[in-house]
Amino acid sequence: MVRVKPFAALRPPKDIVTEVAAPPYDVLNSEEARKMAGEKSLLHITKPEIDFTPIAGEHEQRTYDRAVENFQAWQKKGWLVREDKEKYYVYAQTMGSRTQYGLVLCAHTDDYANGIIKKHELTRKDKEDDRMIHVRIQNANIEPVFFAFKDNAELGAIIAKTAAGVPEYKFIDENDFTHTFWVIDDDAVNARITEIFTKDVDAFYVADGHHRTAAAARVGAEKRAQNPHHTGDEEYNFFMAVCFPESQLAIIDYNRVVKDLNGLDPKAFFKALEEDFVVEKKSSEIYHPAGLHNFSMYFEGVWYSLTAKPGRYDDADPIGVLDVTILSNLVLDKILGIKDLRTSDRIDFVGGIRGLGELARRVDSGEMRVAFALYPVSMQQLINIADTGNIMPPKTTWFEPKLRSGLAIHTLD
């Protein structure tokens, strides 16, 4: 079972929360962050390179130093204020007609090391190293990771009761997503939340934040090695997460655009596709995949339906059943010669939040030659893959809305 605890968060006062809270560090590039960041924005802490003219390198020592200076200054100025005691929090995000409610808590680094916090993606050491530096220099988890857990009726009831009360924060961001945040100030309720997780929740699933999770675990191990009196209960053993019941989450499609046809002319390209797919020409109107194993393709101003033929995939294999696997094996690799999605400069990835019109735009502009849209992965598929110890292909899942940073910060002491 998972190990969790409440924590005494650093939080912005209610009247300036919209000035402090910001998108995650990896959603904006440095130029975009500079344009968005007001005086109190957390971006000065998560993307401190924006404080220099010209913008500094993300990995320069002066950039790291500025991050620490700004974090300390935000506390001295009262823009981030410490809670009086350890608490859990409820954080809701609304996108359109759908709202998802999560618990803000601290998870234990041992659970990651022991596989109780389950991943479905590989991490890159350079990205882990970068996030590890930020956790280490700040001695804090500035931004939360995004976890899912299997539905639990009692936790659901606690979340619902909390959300029926008056929120601490409620605001609409630049994408028209609503963020609502409640503080659970009842000691008995907080104790019960800990007990339920400890007795009834057998795993967390990393939805978004694999590198931040790995980095937090590495910092915890580093601090453990430095402490001859380590017990396992120290604050550095824990890191901040927002955990959502899996039934409330929806994965958005993650699509592909390719620069060329690998030397094929259109006739040869379509002939190769027809070996493994039923290819149907649609129209210039956007065509969305109708279900699993059906893809939409945009080529030379026209949308097509591609349906994988029986026998070209294995529904009994948690990886083989994925449409990203089918497309990678039968089109990107077999026809277009793209062997490694992580390193090839001939392919790019477009989150479904941008709409299929973005795929058409990039092809029509001449930047890309062909685009493919996929039916989104389900949460059950993600859980099956994580439970079986498998790893999804790169760029498979896209979660939206992204967690807003700055609503709560967890320090490691």
Image (cartoon, grey):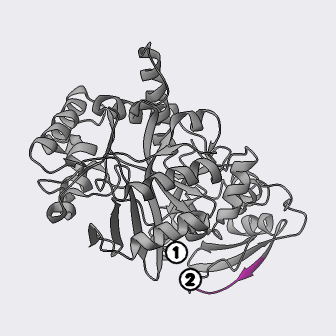
> Which residue is at 78% across, 60% downward?
321
Relative to 384, is 372 on the left or the right? left
Stretch in magenta: 279-284
Circle 1: residue type: Leu
Residue tagged 1: 356
Dividing the picture into quadrants, the one containing residue 266 is bottom right
Mark 2 and mark 1 residues within 8 Å of each other at the beta carbon: yes
> Which residue is at 43% across, 56% downward?
188
Q: Position of residue 297 (x, y in %)?
A: 64, 72
Say if residue 187 shows up in the picture: yes
Q: Residue furthest right?
A: 311
Say if residue 253 shows up in the picture: no
Circle 2: residue type: Ile
Q: Nearer the viewer, residue 344 or 271?
A: 344
Relative to 340, is 227 on the left or the right? left
Label 1 neighbourhood size at 10 Å, few (<14), some (14-19), many (20+)? many
Q: Nearer the viewer, residue 249 or 153?
A: 153
Q: Residue furthest left?
A: 77
Q: Position of residue 60 (x, y in %)?
A: 26, 29
Q: Position of residue 375 (x, y in %)?
A: 65, 71
Residue tagged 2: 286
